[in-house]
Each structure stands twice: as structure tokens, then as C-alpha cells.
Amino acid sequence: MAVKAFYDLPAPAKLNLFLHITGRRADGYHLLQSVFVLIDWADTLHVERRDDGLLRRHDLGPALPADDLSLRAARALQQASGCTFGADISVLKNVPWGAGMGGGSSDAATVLLALNRLWNLNLPRARLLELATPLGADVPFFVGGDNAFVEGIGEKLTPIEWPPRRYAVVKPAESLGTAGIFSHPDLARDTEPATLAGSVAQLNAQHEDGKAFGRNDLQPVAQALCPPIAQVAHWLETRFGNSRMTGSGSAVFATVGAEGVSWSEGELPVGWNGRMCCSLAHHPLRGWAD
């Protein structure tokens, strides 16, 4: 009997362990280098097949935009495959938006992986990656399913092995839009490119000697546009000795040692959203595409 629904599907967030802007293309897109690492802060999705071809999203938590990335992903797959099935997509939003953690992109990737099975399309991962790329720079990473060294405009992914790590991740009440950062005249766009091997080796070394590799080139501009980011960074720095903004949103993370302290309930300032997170070796649904 054909499967008609998948429940409790994870859509994990990610952290940018560093984010360097190495240039800008003629079309205005920025060239970057980063290491993306999956973490266990995740949204939860339920995906049910419809036989009438309609695509519907249902919000089980905070309301999402009317035409969010999960619906756009489903529509892209439907149109590319010619599939006559539809779907009910229910989203329990846990990952904060505007945080730079890729929550919406991860939702879209989980939808692509789930509907590829639910609709019996059996498209290879390479084809799903082609559909993911136009949806957003982070969507291919989640479809790929591996922690990765990222280049280009986010589309060049080289899988890496990343040992288990603990991270304290905090987002202030304020969110931050990507466009304002990337268009800002003060944004540094000339960081010297790094090598994959050198980046990963130095990131691993920082856990041994405490010296952080790289930086987030967006952070100075982001803090000027959204001062609470600096407040969160200082808060984490005083507790864990390090902090860095992730992506182009307002969330900040700190690397925490194996025996590192956490924060007590009620210690986070009002309006801040934070968790102690663990890195993931792979996306939980990585095996859902070849």
C-alpha cells in the first residue's frame, strides 16, 4: 500500500562557523566562503498527500508568510515532475526567522525530500538540488544533507566531516533582513579566499587552543543596523569566552566545551530566544535521496 503521509519530519537549522565575503559578481551577487554545520534546533513538518493536486500549508505555531518557501518548494517539484498529486504541509515553527539559521530554507528542503517520496517520484538528489537552487542560497545545503564548506553564492558545496560540538545559540527579539546588510556601503567585500583544508583545520584547532578562525564579515554592519546583536554577542562572550553572528540574521552563537556551563532558566533577557545545541553529523533525512 502506498504511503500517504509522513509525520514529525525534522527541518534542522544551521550555523555559519565563519562567513567571509570574497568579492562581488557583475550581477550584484556576493561571493562568499563559509562552513555550514547542521544543529539539532529544528522545525517539525507533517506532509500528507492530496489527490486533488492542491497545495496547502497549515501553521501549527507562529503564522508564516502566505507563500513561504515550503509552498514554493512543493510547487517547483510539482511543476518540474508533472505530478498530479497535491499536499497538505503542516509546519510547527521552532527555529526563529530572521536569525540567519536557515529555518525557512530547511523547511523547503524537507518538503522536497518528503514529497519526492510521497509522490513516488524517485528523483535523484542531483535533480532535487537543481530545483533547490532557485529557491534560495541555503536550500541546496539542506538537500545535500552534509556539513559543508560553501563557496560561490552558496551553491558550491563540499561535504566535510565535523566532530560533535556543542553551541549556545541566542537570538534577540529583533530580526534582521538580508537585503539591508548586503547593500550597505560599509560591508567588507574583499576578504582573502581561504582553502577548504586550511579552514577546516583551523576551525578544529580553535577548539583546542581557544583561538577563533575567521569572522563573519556581515557582523559589523549588522550590529550597526541592529544593536541588540552586539548585546547578545557580549552576553555570550562573558559566559563562554567567544561569540559570533551566524549568517545574515540576528542570531549569535558561542562554541561550548564538552563540560561547558549552560544558562539557568530565566537567565536569558526577556524577548531573547536561546538554546544549547549540538551539531549533527548529517541531516536526519539524508538517506531519503541518493
Image (spheres, rainbow, N blue to C red):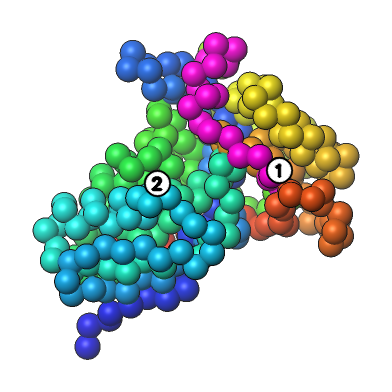
Of the pair 275 and 84, the residue shown nearer to us: 84
Q: Which three-letter amino acid code belongs to the residue tagged 2?
A: Val
Q: Is residue 27 above or below residue 107?
A: above
Q: Which residue is mark 1?
A: 172
Which of the image's four quarters has the N terminus?
bottom left
Q: Secondary structure at mark 2?
A: helix
Ranked by sequence position, the earlier of labels 2 and 1 is 2
- Residue at numbered disc 2: 139
Q: What residue lies at 22% left-to-right and 83% top-to-bottom? A: 2
Where residue 170 appears, x then y in whole percent? 71, 47
Task: List x then y, in percent, for residue 80.
Answer: 16, 52
> Distance from label 2 to label 1 (Cα)?
24 Å
Q: Is residue 172 magenta?
A: yes
Quadrant that contains the C terminus: bottom left
SS type, badge 1: loop
Give yes or no for contact between labels 2 and 1 (Cβ–Cβ under 8 Å).
no
Q: Quadrant of residue 7?
A: bottom left
Camera-nearest residue between 55 and 199:
55
Q: Nearer the viewer, residue 242 or 184?
A: 184
Q: Would you say residue 15 sits in the magenta stretch?
A: no
Q: Position of residue 279 (x, y in %)?
A: 62, 55
Residue drawn at 60 percent across, 25 percent down: 218
Circle 1: residue type: Pro
Part of the protein shown in magenta:
170-189
Mark 2 is surrounded, within 10 Å at the Cα level, by few (under 14), some (14 to 19) or many (20 or more) other residues, namely many
The tag on residue 46 is: none
**Residue 237 locus on image (x, y percent):** 83, 38
